[in-house]
Image: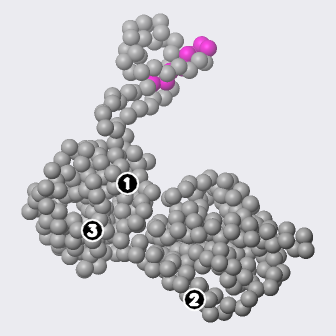
Amino acid sequence: MKNEKIIRIAYDVSRWIVGLTFLFSSFSKGVDPLGTSYKIQEYMTAWSIGSFSFEWALPMATFLSVAMITLEFFVGVLLITNCWRKLGAWLLLLMMSFFTITTFIDALTNKVTDCGCFGDMVKLTNWETFGKNVVLMVFTIIVFCCRSKFSKKRTFERDILVAFFSIGVAISFQLYNIANEPILDFRSWKIGNRMMPEEKGEVVTYLKYKNKTSGEIDEFTSDKLMDYYKDTAWVSNWEFVDSRIEDPNEIYADGFSMMDPTGEDYAKDIIGSPDYVLIATIHHLNDIDDKEIRRMKQVYRYAQERGLYMVLLVSVSSSQTEVVDFLLENKMDNIDFYYADEKAIETMLRSNPGFILLRNSVVVNKWHHSNVGDLIAMTTEDFE
């Protein structure tokens, strides 16, 4: 009896730990299923088995994302409610085996630097993720080994209701977050975030020089170096090695730029503008349908009527000719357009197209294209 009680406690503790982890993991990804689909695409692109690649499955990424998150939520609910114990234990073992093997390969190869197991909510290194899965695997084995040890009153009807309800909730929640911007935003372009320092700092250039005799390497600011150059002996004994620039005014999004067709970056000017700026983002120009174009034209007309400066940010994969033709065809040809990396645009807004309003580098608001009614309902007072 004592051993049975210990085993029962170990089983209950294990299923609650793994179940809550699965629920948290599915929720953190479910708020942004498109973000998870981008991560799946990253795996498909980075991984291959010999000459066999997975890029053929790229169009299925969103479906696979929704399916995986739904299954994860379903298993978490089964563990917490103790329903369908054998089914839940088998699904859990298969999923955890897959996750553990995958993250171990990730940790060794580093082909995908972040597995995205908790979406953008919690970031872990590959080795941290693998370690987490090893711990969960211990609890998984306990759950699996105890799946038939305890008698349970048959509650088939309740189990069916729990299964259908959990699957329905998971799918509905994800579809809502696909049809709108995620209800919780953990990305750098979150509403209210400041994207540049409030106070502009001085850009400093550092230059590295090497002593020809001792091999010593020293670094100087450009201003200080001018003083050294007055000393001819110093000039003859030191040679230039490298230089770097420290710009305290950088945008708080790694590598973000807004290049015009000539290659000049206007990101700081646009993001840091003291006036309101509305950026329309398109990360896949060829994927926009007629309904989405009509919504974009609505926003464009609204901006024209309000005197609101609006620019277009498109992926670098779109040629200048494609962008110009698109704007001419839809009578938006006097809009300024800029280029950015596709992933950078997807990080700003999941919607294609999407709209983001900024002022003084602060994200004032963001809209999915299906919610442009909220955007064009803004009055003059909203811009004061």
Q: Residue at x 58, y 75 (%)?
A: 73
Return the disc, 1 or 3, that comes first in the chain's sequence.
Answer: 1
Q: Quadrant of residue 22?
A: bottom right
Q: What range of the chain is rendered magenta? A: 207-214
Q: Where's residue 193, x and y in %?
A: 36, 49
Q: Residue at x 57, y 88 (%)?
A: 161
- Residue indicated by mark 2: 161
Kind of residue at badge 3 = Glu
Q: Main secondary structure of the magenta part?
A: strand
Residue closer to the observer: 17 or 340:
17
Kind of residue at badge 2 = Leu
Image vertical order of residue 73 relative to residue 349, above or below: below
- Residue indicated by mark 1: 189
> Along the horizontal axis of the image, is 95 left or right of 185?
right
- Residue indicated by mark 3: 322
Q: Looking at the image, which residue sits at the far bottom?
A: 157
Q: Where's residue 172, x and y in %?
A: 45, 80
Q: Would residue 208 be counted in the magenta stretch?
A: yes
**From mark 1 to mark 2, how far is it between C-alphas?**
39 Å
Q: Quadrant of residue 221?
A: top left
Q: Secondary structure at mark 1?
A: loop
Image quadrant containing the N terminus: bottom right
> Along the horizontal axis of the image, is 76 left or right of 358?
right
The number of callouts visible is: 3
Kind of residue at badge 1 = Trp
